[in-house]
Each structure stands twice: as C-alpha cells, then as structure tokens.
Image: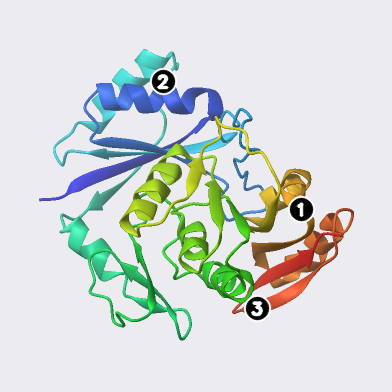
Amino acid sequence: MGWQSVSFLTDASHAEPICDALLEAGALSASIEDADAGTPDEQPLFGEPGSVPSSGWTHSRVVALLEPDADIEALLSEVAQAVGLAEAPAYAVEPVAEQNWVQLTQSQFDPIRVSERLWIVPSWHETPDPNAINLILDPGMAFGTGSHPTTRLCLEWLERHVSDSCTVLDYGCGSGILAIAAARLGAGSVAGVDIDPLAVEAARANAERNGVVALFADSTTPVAGEYDLVVANILSNPLRVLAPAICAHVRSGGRLALSGILREQADEIIAIYAQWMPMHVADTREDWVCLAGIKP
C-alpha cells in the first residue's frame, strides 16, 4: 500500500502556516518548493551567514504526503479554514508507491574515485582502496555527495592547492565534503559555513565520522577572519550577490575557487569579481566550470 502526494500553489506568507496546518490535520509530511524552479523566475534563498534569511518564495508550491485513504477535500478545507483562506486551493494528486526508501537511496550512491589518492565513500560502503584518502560521507539532508561535477571540480582544486599550514573556508559547506577533504589533505585549520542548519548538522557529523577537526557554523554565527583558501560551491545567483562577503574572507595573496557556475555564466561572474580579484576558468567538467583567482 502506498500514499498520496498532494501539491498546490500558494504565496510566501501562507506557505509555512499551511504546512503547519497540514501536519496538524494528519499529513505525514509537508514541504515547500519554489514553484518557479528551473525557470528564469527561480528565486534562490540565500544570505550572508549572520544575516536574516529571506522569508520564502513568492510563488510557493506546497507538497504534502497523505495516507492512502485520506479525504483530501476535507483535509484541505480544514487547512484553508485554519489559515484564513476563503476556499481550499486547487490541487494535484499523485500516487506514491511503497518502497524500501533507505535501500533505494543507498543504491544510488557508489564510491567515487576523485584522483589517484582521493576517494569519496558512502558510509554504508566498504572502502575500495584502504591506502587512499577516503572521505566517508553520509550527506543526510545536505547537498554534497561528490557525484556532482561542481563538487568534483572543487575537490580537484583543493587537492592542487591545500598545504600543511594553510587555512581553508568552505563557503556554503552543505554536507561538509570540501572542508573535510581539505582537512584530510593536510590543511592547518578548516572552517565551513552554511545558511541551512541541517547542512551544518550533517557537516559536523561527517567531520566526526572522518576523524577531522573543522569548525562549522550556520547563519546565526557571523563568519570572521581571512583565509589562505576559500572555496564556494553554491549557485551563480548567490555568488553574484555574496561576492563582497566571499572576497572579504580571502587574505591578500590567498586563493579563491568558485563553482556551481555554468559555462555560459562564467564571463559574467568573472566580471563581477574583477573589482576584488582577477578570476579565470581553472577547469571544466561537462557544462560546469570552476573559476579561480588570487587576491592582490
């Protein structure tokens, strides 16, 4: 027996109250997505760590998981009344088949060889090469399994530039994979920051799993200091807006690497960062690039 997935559109001011009301009414789960994701109107939510995040997507899609016998009409009417809507929203429903979700998720991730000496190994796998630097990873709810081209580009950049005495900041750390790799590669001290508290939790757990010391902070803790190496593998929109903050953390003579950038976006990002440091395309993988530069 499976479940019902119900989705409908709303605005930023109603999205969270609706999710709360759905859970109170018996929904198994409720989540909010950007209804414009994948379009030119996509609205990334981001902010400088220490700042107050955006309140939500202007065009939000709420997705709720319900029991197979749930009365959708009655439930949505109850939710509408609870949050002060004049009527229940129009909705779409899809069946969700029952599966072994843990097994399904784990089957999607295999060990990844980054280089001759660096592997990424999911926590449920045996290490293919015990003599290599094996990053044991459980991404949890955070981005960063090592399979995405941008993560690979940043790992390769770190492997080229990390030295025994250097300091490293992973800006937008997600699962902590880049910060942990820097520590395993021999960096002197490592820090990571992410606006998502769940990502910070995952990063701390992964650091402990790998036996490394790294300081991870979320958006309630302002990031301070300058670093020898700063790496930011996020998205082009936050890279545009956060350029002053990111560059402020690179010491004079220090290096910066940026990824999460498509080939056609590279020139624009290079132009934006030019007022702080010259950037160039250091490497490419599929449709993605890694930009790198040295701060004067």
In this rendered view, identify the residue nearer to me: 104 or 252. Answer: 252
Q: Sequence-wise, which precedes: disc 1 or disc 3?
A: 1
Q: Is residue 31 left or right of residue 42?
A: left
* Quadrant in which the C terminus is drawn: bottom right
Q: Which mark is residue 284?
A: 3
Is residue 34 among the parts visible in the rendering? Answer: no
* 10 Å crowding of disc 2: few (<14), some (14-19), many (20+): few
Q: Which residue is mark 2?
A: 87
Secondary structure found at label 2: loop
**Which quadrant holds residue 244?**
top right
Q: Secondary structure at mark 1?
A: strand
Horizontal and vertical percent position of residue 97: 19, 56
What residue is drawn where x is 69% and y is 42%?
225
Q: Position of residue 136 (x, y in %)?
A: 33, 65
| Residue type, mark 3 in image | Thr
Verify CB contact (< 8 Å) between mark 1 and mark 3.
no
Disc 1 to disc 2, C-alpha distance: 56 Å
Q: Position of residue 99 (x, y in %)?
A: 16, 58
What crowding class fits label 3: few (fewer than 14 Cα within 10 Å), some (14-19), or many (20 or more)? some
Residue found farthest to the front: 165
Mark closest to the chain's N terminus, 2 or 3: 2
Q: Which mark is residue 149?
A: none
Describe residue 289's horizontal placement relative to residue 146 as left or right: right
Q: Please name the residue that numbered disc 1 is placed on.
A: 251
Query: Could you tell me which residue is drawn at 60 percent across and 69 percent down?
Result: 163
Q: Is residue 85 visible?
A: yes
Q: Nearer the viewer, residue 201 or 105?
A: 201
Structural distance between the alpha carbons of marks 1 and 3: 25 Å
Q: Secondary structure at mark 3?
A: strand
Residue 152: percent from left, percent from top: 53, 72
